[in-house]
Image (cartoon, helix red, strand yellow):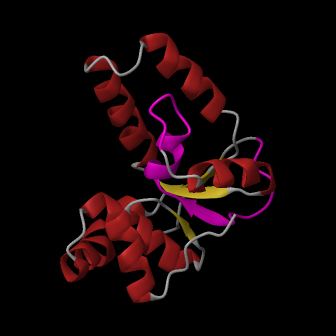
Amino acid sequence: MTPVALWHPIARGAPTLILHPSVALAWSFLGNANTYPSDVLWRMPLNVPAVPLCWSLQVAEALLAAELRGSGTRAQVDNFLAGLHSFPFFVDGEMSARAWSHILPLARAYSLPVYDAAYLELALRLKLPLATIDPNLTRTAANVGVPIFTP
């Protein structure tokens, strides 16, 4: 089977980091008191983030949940997504093929949600640092030798 990788039309070069939704969502109207997401955002023009196929669905789910609970408006969601779309993303197309053979075992071994294990597996496979503010994923990344992206 040939690996599938989808490149955003304006992607410049190979991926340089794995971007977890926790960081991208902190750029939105949802915010975060942690300065790390802002530091990552400032470095985005110099980087191409890689994400698994589930990334856009996870971001959309979190934004819709915020909209439904009144933490944001449809206009805020649409504006954020328009800005996010301007970044060049490498969307890895191998998640489905690796879900049962690589991602599920990682999730089991480290008691991670399967979605988070997908980011860890991608970081391991591409040998790239992970940008995340999820504490459990940060600890697990350290345990398996995946560096956290330093802006």
Residue 33 in view in this figure = yes
The x and y percentages for residue 51 are 52, 56
Look at 24% across and 62% down and name the residue there. 113
In the image, residue 22 lies in the stretch drawn in magenta: yes
The magenta-colored residue range is 10-32
Depth check, front residue: 60 or 142: 142
Look at 34% across and 20% down and name the residue there. 67
The x and y percentages for residue 99 are 30, 66
The x and y percentages for residue 142 are 44, 83
Question: Height in image: 133 above or below 83?
Answer: below
Depth check, front residue: 98 or 69: 69
Look at 36% across and 66% down and name the residue there. 135
Left or right of 58 in this view: 146:
right
Depth check, front residue: 139 or 48: 139
The x and y percentages for residue 146 are 50, 81
Question: Height in image: 39 above or below 28?
Answer: below
Residue 92 in view in this figure = no
> Which image quadrant is residue 85 in?
top right
Q: Residue furthest front?
A: 33
Question: Height in image: 68 above or below 101?
Answer: above
In the image, residue 97 lies in the stretch drawn in magenta: no
Question: Height in image: 53 above or below 14?
Answer: above
Q: Quadrant of the C terminus?
A: bottom right
Left or right of 26 in this view: 143:
left
The rendered magenta stretch, by its main secondary structure, is classed as loop
